[in-house]
Amino acid sequence: GAGVSQSPSNKVTEKGKDVELRCDPISGHTALYWYRQSLGQGLEFLIYFQGNSAPDKSGLPSDRFSAERTGGSVSTLTIQRTQQEDSAVYLCASSLEMTAGPGNTIYFGEGSWLTVV
Amino acid sequence: AQKVTQAQTEISVVEKEDVTLDCVYETRDTTYYLFWYKQPPSGELVFLIRRNSFDEQNEISGRYSWNFQKSTSSFNFTITASQVVDSAVYFCALADSGYALNFGKGTSLLVTP
């Protein structure tokens, strides 16, 4: 597609359930990023992928969070045993290369709004 | 450590006024990149500009202009003759040679008719 596509756009889940959020990056973009935007907390970096590899997972808030990327394209962010504090907008982004160098603009999707009740 | 400060939480202006959004950053790196993004109510972050640390030239794009000053570690954004469609949250962000964008907390701009 022309832009970064995320699904679902909105998700309401019960506390304790698992959720999967999907990101389809811009075609040809090797780098993929997940961010979380919570009310009053700004944008928080979670994880990035270079190809299918995630060299640094230290931004993930807890071991309930995991992410994978297959075929150098689609990525899934999984949250297990969701808690109310997980309620946020989860934003995916992609860029041609990993670093923020010339020509490597990072493009964001519209986000997945997660509400845990 | 990196840090981006957007001291203005909310700004309200009347259409056609000029408005400047402030951004102050902290980094120990000599090579870094600064960004501005716009987030309209739809939620998508829209890229506006990227600037590297070696280029202090100010830039103008239509009604938008950016003032980068390394001496004060600032990268301010001015909208001239604001319009209602400019209403959004604007984020300033900093990246070094790594991979993560460090965002400020954003400035919510409301332009009223």
Image: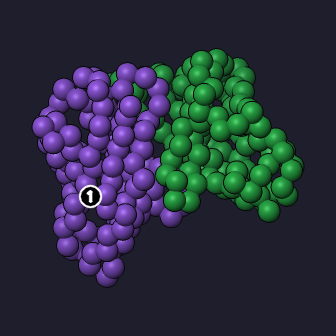
Q: Residue B90 falls in which quadrant of the image?
A: bottom left
In the depicted view, which residue is nearer to us: A54 or B5?
A: B5
Q: What count of labels does the image hold?
A: 1
Is B103 rendered above or below residue A29? Answer: below
Residue A95 appears in the rendering: yes
Is B62 rendered above or below residue A61? Answer: below
Residue A26 appears in the rendering: no
> Which residue is at the far front?
B1
Q: Residue A38 falls in which quadrant of the image?
A: bottom right
Whole-percent x and y of residue A39? 56, 60
The amino acid type found where label 1 is placed reads Leu
**Residue at point 43% right, 23% down?**
B98
**Residue at point 50% right, 64% down?**
B41
Is A85 rendered above or below residue A52? Answer: below
Residue on which the image places disc 1: B21
Whole-percent x and y of residue A44? 53, 43
Q: Chain B rendered in what hue? A: purple
> Which residue is at the far bottom?
B113
Which quarter of the figure is the N terminus of chain A placed in? top right
**Residue at point 22% right, 60% down?**
B20
Q: Specify whether B35 is left or right of B102.
A: left
The answer for which chain carries disc 1 is B
Q: Which chain is green?
A: A
